[in-house]
Image: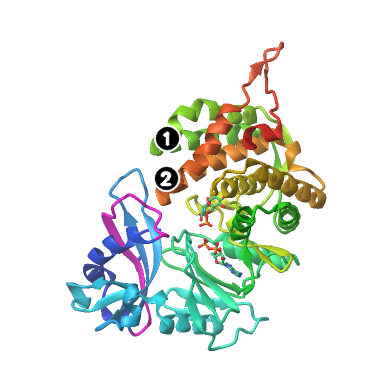
Amino acid sequence: MRKVVSPRPSGHSPAHLLTSLADLLRTWLPEQRWFAGKGRRVTDLSLLSVTELHPGCLHLLVSTGDGSAARPGDCYQLLLGVGDVLPPRLAHARIGRASEGPLAGLTVYDALQEPRSADLLLERLRTPGTAGPLRFERDAKVAVPAGLTPRLLDAEQSNSSLVYGNAYILKIFRRVQCGINPDLEVPWALARQGCTRVPAPVAWFRTSQPQPATLGVLQPFLPDAVDGWTLALDSLTAGREFTDEAYELGRATAEVHLALAAAFALGAPTGHGSRRLAAAMIERLDATSRSVPELMPYVAGLRGAFDALAVLDSGRPVQRIHGDLHLGQVLRAGERWFVIDFEGEPARPIAERRQPQSPVRDVAGMLRSFDYAARSRHPWRPEWARRCRDAYCAGYAAQARWDPRAESELLRAYETDRAVYEALYEARHRPDWLPVPMAAIARLAEHAPTPTPTPSGSPHTPVPSFHSAQGG
Ligand SMILES: Nc1ncnc2c1ncn2[C@@H]1O[C@H](COP(=O)(O)OP(=O)(O)O)[C@@H](O)[C@H]1O
Ligand SMILES: O=P(O)(O)O[C@H]1O[C@H](CO)[C@@H](O[C@H]2O[C@H](CO)[C@@H](O)[C@H](O)[C@H]2O)[C@H](O)[C@H]1O
């Protein structure tokens, strides 16, 4: 997202406002959990859009860059409060005091932490309309009540979420990309399909400038739900099995996949497209190993999984999928699993995330997650993860009528690709966690299939057993 500028708040041009905000945001942005450019300095900063939502509350789209010509800048959505004095209860929201420009002497803070601004956002969503380039819309069939008490969710998130009265949750996308966000598009389509595994959007807001983009989505909040990651860790801590839950989760995943296949156009079977997919995975491996040197010793071993994929002729069609499925993206309320966060991998371009892909990719994401959970507790219990993985695939097979374990090369390639993604994610966001995906990478590299020439000279890949690579 670049360049265009929207209406002027209270008579100040964005360029003028930037003189007040630039220094503050250069320091504050990189400290935020949702800031994608971890480890990079914000050297270029510009305001793409400024909208005064109400006096003292600015909605901004800012573009940040690190000065490198090779990396395009990112666009972030901010809601900033500006005032003379910050009440002590908002001390934690303080960004700083502007020293120059039109806001000189005023204190700037993160307005999402302020109930008044959160109330106002909900009011906007309840009563559709526009504010400058922002458009607020809702499902006319759902009446959202007024006056619900807001609280900002304290979760480790890629975005920011406000919960209203334990009845609704508003996700505010932090890193904004041009186009409809799959986290609005997919749950909306699934709801139309009658799929009840996904909370259906009831309201949303978007911008038309600098380019059309989704900015936030309001959905029903499941008040008694616990996420799969917390449940899995509880089970590990208590020395309990998690296979019944994993089986049901496999069924829920398959149900969502079937609904997705019905709601969106299917793509052609992977067929010879496997070569292109393998090439993309190899490219990601090479690029990641340049950023995460710990990967270097394993690159040759890991490539085996991608080489095997390149010669695979899969007859299974591709379809829309979740794209970033793991235990943190599933919620259990009572005995029932729900799937949330259809944004896909936030670092990838939206156009790519909306492409049909193999459902095996989601399955691989969840299988990696069982491994993650088992790895994050001492002593490591590989058998626990192996049983969960098996139960999950069995549940999936029972619902989908095909077993992901039968797609062993595809599954292995996607698991390897996911582990590489995780290594990059952890190196950037949580370096202490890097050993978790690295342990899987070491195993996957060690057990990687080696394409061997067949008597006819065409490559033949021995299929490793499903358990050998991940189980121990
Ligand atoms: N509909 C919901 N009901 C209950 N909790 C939810 C719901 N949607 C999200 N959450 C909670 O919010 C957290 C973050 O949501 P998520 O969509 O994964 O955001 P992000 O993309 O920022 O990671 C989840 O882990 C979950 O705890
Ligand atoms: O923010 P998102 O939930 O969209 O996803 C990102 O952050 C996740 C961590 O919060 C990360 O997931 C990795 O860690 C999880 C445990 O914290 C584990 O369950 C996942 O299997 C593992 O991939 C995810 O990769 C990232 O996209």
Residue 201 in percent (x, y) is at 62, 71
Q: Quadrant of residue 16?
A: bottom left
Q: Nearer the viewer, residue 457 or 245?
A: 245
Q: Residue under circle 1? A: 294
Residues at marks 1 and 2 touching, judged by CB atoms closer than 8 Å: yes
Q: Which of 37 and 277 is in front in this view?
A: 37
Residue 42 belongs to magenta span = yes
Quarter the C terminus occupies = top right
Residue 277 x/y as whole percent = 59, 36
The magenta-colored residue range is 33-55
Task: Specify whether residue 47 is painted magenta.
Answer: yes
Residue under the point 57% across and 27% down: 446
**Above or below, 154 relative to 415:** below
Residue behind mark 2: 427
**289 lies left or right of 184:** left
What element does badge 1 sit on? helix
- Amino acid type of the residue that numbered disc 2 sits on in the rendered structure: Ala
Q: Is 246 or 353 nearer to us in this picture?
A: 246
Quadrant where the N terminus sits is: bottom left
Residue type at mark 1: give it.
Glu
Tell me, yes or no, if residue 300 can be seen here. Answer: yes
Earlier sequence position, callout 1 versus callout 2: 1
* Percent x, y of residue 53: 40, 80
Q: Residue furthest left?
A: 100
Drawn side of residue 455 relative to residue 381, left or right:
right
Residue drawn at (82%, 50%) of the image: 398
